[in-house]
Image (cartoon, helix red, strand yellow):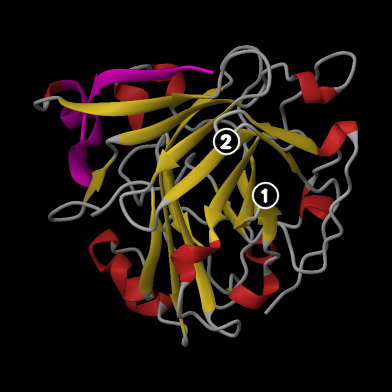
Amino acid sequence: MKTNINKRIGVVTVASIAAVIMTAAKTAAIEYDLSTLGSQSFNVPGDVGGTAVFADNWTQPAGTGVFQPFLTLEANGQSSTGSQVVEQAFNTDGFGALYMDQQRPQWNNRVTLGDLAQVNVNGTLYYAFLLDANEPGASKSIISVDNVRIYTSAADHTAAVGNDLTQLDQLGTLRWALNSPTGPNGSWNINNWVKLDAAQENINGGASNANGGSGQSDMVLYVPVTAFAGSLSTDYLWFYNLNGAHYGVDGDLGAESGYEEWSYVASSTQLIPDAASTVVLLGLGLLAVECARRKFVSA
């Protein structure tokens, strides 16, 4: 496990992302590197909502039909960021509308807080979100996960946000954020970010250390339940994700190839303590049991 303190770009403007990353004045930022061999995790203090945990995760099969995403996004061919290797989106009722870089309406869904399981890790409760990142494989498998922002609200205000990043906070009450604020005039704050290898070998992948590609999840994000104090189980949960924004520092970090898909550990999930479904939370010094299967509940 290694935390690299690097000089990185803190704010990236949507309209000229490549130029800004390459030339803007640099500010100190933290890179959480999950790309090296073996299971790793990091305690990550959010700018809002307390300390979360980002960790390698291996579950198989995790293909779309089993994984049941509630947010699916893809950079290629999209225009919300002005770059084909940077993607952003938040979950919606996909059949009503797809905004930003959402793809496939059946795998973009509204979620309520009550749909999520509360995962008890040594007395601390978390909500767990799973990422299946799809990158080209051996030729280019790393990607930067540059922001996650999670909101709750009693009503669906996604249409008020649409494709306008400057309106993102209209989603509701911000409960947890890797980076906040989003930035002035429609820009991104990407001070803190995760370097993920979507095809890395992983000791939880069995004898072959296999991992990566569509059908195998790559990362789990544990967000503290305390960040949602005052929320109701019937409140909607809105999950915003930005990936690939560090491609100007390293071109391999761009979001390429297939979809990135986010799922969650559902309240109906039974947590199974077996060798293929555990995540070692090194940063916490704990062993957390992760799900091998989950049932998606649509709102």
Q: Earlier in the sequence, mark 2 or mark 1?
A: 1
Which span of residues is magenta-colored? 1-22
Judge left or right: residue 42 versus residue 107.
left
Q: Amino acid at mark 1?
A: Val
The residue located at (90%, 15%) in the rendering is 207
Quick one: label 2, few (<14), some, or many (20+) residues within 10 Å? Answer: some
Badge 1 marks a residue whose secondary structure is strand
Q: Nearer the viewer, residue 193 or 62?
A: 193
Q: Nearer the viewer, residue 104 or 54?
A: 54
Residue on which disc 1 sits: 121
The residue located at (80%, 19%) in the rendering is 210
Judge left or right: residue 10 versus residue 223.
left
Viewport quadrant of the C terminus: bottom right
Is residue 59 something one can see in this rendering? no
What label sits on residue 284 in the rendered view?
2
Q: Quadrant of residue 70?
A: bottom right
Badge 2 marks a residue whose secondary structure is loop
Q: Nearer the viewer, residue 207 or 49?
A: 49
Q: Position of residue 83 (x, y in %)?
A: 34, 38
What label sits on residue 38 in the rendered view?
none
Task: Answer above or below: position of 37 versus 227.
Answer: above
Q: Amino acid at mark 2?
A: Leu
Q: Position of residue 101 (x, y in %)?
A: 46, 53
